[in-house]
């Protein structure tokens, strides 16, 4: 995938500038992030432009993601507040095979429990703080092969979700934003922005983009989708687009 490599945040999260993505090695990190619900995407993009934000990926910068969560039949990972996920990324304009991702590379990610305890009821925690958890991830060559290995180990797909992500970074002149990633996610339940990196940078970026700490969302897309289904009185399935955007 043709891209401009992002930076590491204190050795935490991404490749150092100048490294090739093919050299993606196992990364053991502490993920620090928040989500924000975006009501006006055009206004947000205009603000990002004024701030000098640049795309991390070349071209349109828009990447389709097909994500699959794995768990045991007894949902042991969920009970331990852990997550095991494969992700297939396809640049905008290329063909994504969705569930039939044979031969495509996959990003395998493990996430540990949220530091500081569980979110009540498994629902979304809104207002203040940051979501902090262990994250280990690395790239593997074949999404279908990875899934088969996990299934042989007693795992099964427990949830699929897709989205389009466009990732931005602020210019080097904004030294306070070093290591910060601004990720705009188009999902079947609306548009969200994830801010990932140093806590102070997250807070400052959120403020400059017109948000306050009471807007912070500290949960994952599966929980957000479950809440959306409950509001609409619909049975929860996979979080996928009815028609490819």
Image: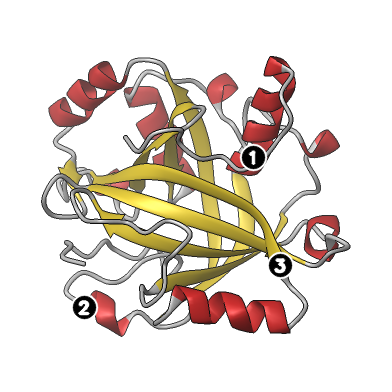
Q: What element carries label 1?
A: loop
* Residue under the point 71% across and 17% down: 231
Look at mark 2 in the image and give the residue it sits on. 20
* Position of 177 relative to 186 (above/below): below
Q: Quick one: label 3 or label 2, which is nearer the N terminus? A: 2
Q: Say which residue label 3 marks.
A: 156
Query: In this rendering, does residue 90 appear at all?
Result: yes
Q: Where is residue 209 in the image (x, y as percent from the top left)?
A: 33, 24
Q: Tell me if residue 27 can be seen.
A: no
What is the C-alpha distance between the residues marked 1 and 2? 31 Å
Q: In which quarter of the image is residue 153?
A: bottom right
Pick whichever, 5 or 67, lies toward us.
67
198 on left or right of 94: right
Residue 210 appears at what percent x and percent y?
A: 37, 18
Colour mapping: secondary structure
Q: Which disc, if any, is residue 219? A: 1
Q: From the viewer's perspective, is the residue at label 1 or at label 3 nearer?
A: 3
| Quadrant of the snapshot with the C terminus | top left
Q: What element carries label 3?
A: strand
Q: Which residue is drawn at 42% across and 56% down?
A: 98
Q: How crowded is mark 2: few (under 14 residues within 10 Å), some or many (20 or more)?
A: few
Tell me, yes or no, whether the two marked residues, 1 and 3, touch with CB atoms within 8 Å: no
């Amino acid at each position: 995938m043709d891209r401009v490599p992002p930076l590491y945040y204190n050795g935490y999260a991404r490749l150092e500038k100048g490294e090739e993505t093919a050299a993606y090695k196992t990364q053991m990190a502490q993920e620090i992030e928040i989500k924000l619900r975006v009501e006006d995407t055009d206004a947000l993009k205009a603000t990002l432009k004024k701030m000098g934000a640049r795309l991390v990926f070349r071209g349109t910068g828009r990447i389709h993601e097909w994500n699959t969560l794995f768990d045991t039949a007894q949902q042991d990972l969920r009970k331990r507040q852990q997550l095991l996920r494969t992700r297939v990324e396809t640049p905008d304009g290329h063909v994504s095979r969705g569930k039939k991702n044979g031969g495509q590379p996959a990003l395998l990610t493990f996430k540990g429990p949220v530091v500081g305890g569980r979110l009540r009821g498994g629902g979304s925690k809104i207002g203040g703080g940051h979501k902090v958890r262990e994250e280990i991830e690395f790239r593997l060559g074949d999404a279908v092969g990875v899934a088969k290995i996990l299934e042989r180990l007693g795992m099964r797909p427990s949830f699929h979700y897709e989205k389009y992500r466009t990732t931005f970074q602020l210019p080097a002149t904004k030294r306070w934003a070093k290591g910060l990633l601004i990720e705009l996610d188009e999902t079947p339940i609306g548009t969200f922005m994830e801010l990932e990196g140093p806590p102070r940078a997250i807070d400052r970026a959120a403020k400059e983009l017109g948000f306050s700490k009471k807007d912070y969302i500290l949960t994952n897309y599966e929980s957000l989708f479950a809440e959306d289904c409950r509001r609409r009185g619909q049975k929860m399935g996979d979080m996928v687009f009815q028609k490819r955007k």
